[in-house]
Image (cartoon, helix red, strand yellow):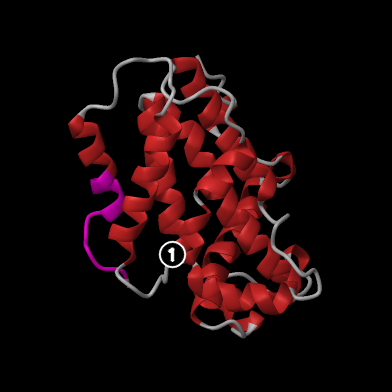
Amino acid sequence: MAVIPEGGRVQEEKSATLRPDAQRNRERILEVALAELTRAADAPLSAIAKKAGVGQGTFYRNFPNREALVLEVYRYEMQQVADTAAQLLQTRAPDQALREWMNRLAQYAMAKAGLADALRKTTSRYGSLAQLGHGPVTQAVTLLLNANEEAGTIRPGLTPDDFVLAIAGLWQIDPHSDWQPRATRLLDLVMDGLRAGASRADGPATDEREADRSQANGPGEGRT
């Protein structure tokens, strides 16, 4: 049985140090900043603060400059994706949880492609985004792989690095194209590879595979 972090979340401890109202303000700023920076990498910080409904003082206490805001938006979004791993394991079989989490990661990667310009401008001095959000995602992948290995639904001995390399093709898909079918096919192939050599003899049922594809496509075919 997989050990799921208390509250079903894989999260950083620093958020627990904020008062509830301060935490709500911070999360609201991040949500608005994500939307605004996705639309325009140079979105004014004053406009973000106004749309978030916070004063300039509150805004700059949380994010003293644009660099701090952009980096935290990225980390926050990756944390949100990572948190769903534990939540899915509470309600689904391990292999279904893993496959659905892969869908959510793909949806994040495609939908947030517009944030790339802001990230590129902010992080050019670092040369790489490799370390941003790495910890939470690694924890989430580890949790999912361990649960599946214990259930015998994937081959033993896989590491988070193996998984990341296997899904690297996601970032080669044009987010402005009809990306859902391509992502679904890629992730189906990855999942088949993970299952090869699993100790459990029975494979996924057909309806589970169709559910995977339904999750990947979402309730609608298009994307705004």
* Left-right relation of 13 to 88: right
* Left-right relation of 129 to 10: right
Closer to us: 202 or 147: 202
* Left-right relation of 190 to 161: left
Q: Within 10 angstroms of label 1, few (less than 14), some, or many (20 or more) residues?
A: many
Closer to us: 136 or 17: 136
Q: SS at mark 1?
A: helix
* Left-right relation of 59 to 212: right
Q: For residue 51, say whether it is visible.
A: no
Q: Position of residue 170 (x, y in %)?
A: 46, 58
Residue at the image point whose x is 25% and y is 37% from the top: 209
Q: For residue 28, say whether it is visible.
A: yes
**Is 100 placed above or below 154 here?**
below
The boundaries of the magenta stretch are: 213-223
Q: At label 1, which amino acid type do we have?
A: Met
Quarter of the rendering occupied by the C terminus:
bottom left
Residue sitting farthest toward the front = 197
Residue at the image point whose x is 28% and y is 27% from the top: 204
Q: Which residue is mark 1?
A: 110
Residue at the image point whose x is 49% and y is 80% from the top: 39
Residue 190 in magenta? no
